[in-house]
Image (tube, rainbow, N blue to C red):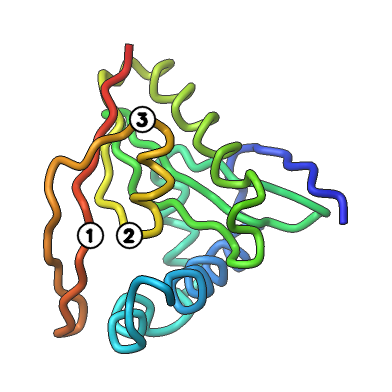
Amino acid sequence: MNNEILVRLFEVADADAAAQIFYDAVRIGAAEFYDEAQRAAWAVDVPDSDVWRDRLLAQPTFVAISNAQLVGYMTIAADGYIDLAFVRPDRIGTGVAKALYDAVEAKAIELGASRLYSEASYLAKQFFERQGWVVVKPQIIERHGVKLTNFVMEKLLG
């Protein structure tokens, strides 16, 4: 398999694949860190493509393409907030997240952000720490009545 990764901006036609990646990343990719009830509360079902499309179009979103398939995506707001960062479970550890992250960090600097920040899952926390991020604080959030731990994290830029 050719693992070449192309990073580009999100397009409307990416919505279905992006919604499925979210669902699979939570339900399969996060299984090491969250139990079945937590993953089911986080991703009840595959998100509606129109809703997901609108959410991804509302902010700069970079997608990773490999072998003509969408394999991950990451958003970046003008103030440096990363809202969504998901990689297809079978591509975790293959450079997809790093390729997306490099594009997102460059865009944040271009937009004049002084820092990057996010509310990261256990899996994302490990990745962000390798990129020089620090944990500001752990927090407990609730989804559909189920408690999950994530981490407020940041990286100062410049």
SS under mark 3: loop
Q: Nearer the viewer, residue 83 or 121?
A: 121
Amino acid at pointer 3: Gly
SS under mark 2: helix
Where is residue 115, by image quadrant?
top left
Drawn side of residue 34 relative to residue 107, left or right = left
On screen, 102 above or below 36?
above
Q: Can you identify the residue that label 1 sits on?
A: 150
Crowding at dot 2, Cα within 10 Å, few <14 / some 14-19 / many 20+, comes out as some
Percent of width and height locating residue 61:
49, 42
Where is residue 35, by image quadrant?
bottom left
Q: Can you identify the residue that label 2 sits on?
A: 122
On screen, 125 above or below 48?
above
Residue at (50, 70) in percent of width and height: 29
Q: Residue furthest right?
A: 1
Q: Residue furthest top?
A: 158
Cα–Cα gap, marks 1 and 2: 6 Å
Q: Are marks 3 and 1 in contact (CB under 8 Å)?
A: no
Amino acid at pointer 2: Tyr
Q: Can you identify the residue that label 3 sits on?
A: 132
Q: Nearer the viewer, residue 54 or 28?
A: 28
SS under mark 1: strand
Percent of width and height locating residue 144:
20, 83
* Residue 36 - label: none
On screen, 13 above or below 77?
below
Of callouts 1 and 2, the N-terminal one = 2
Amino acid at pointer 1: Asn
Of callouts 2 and 3, the N-terminal one = 2
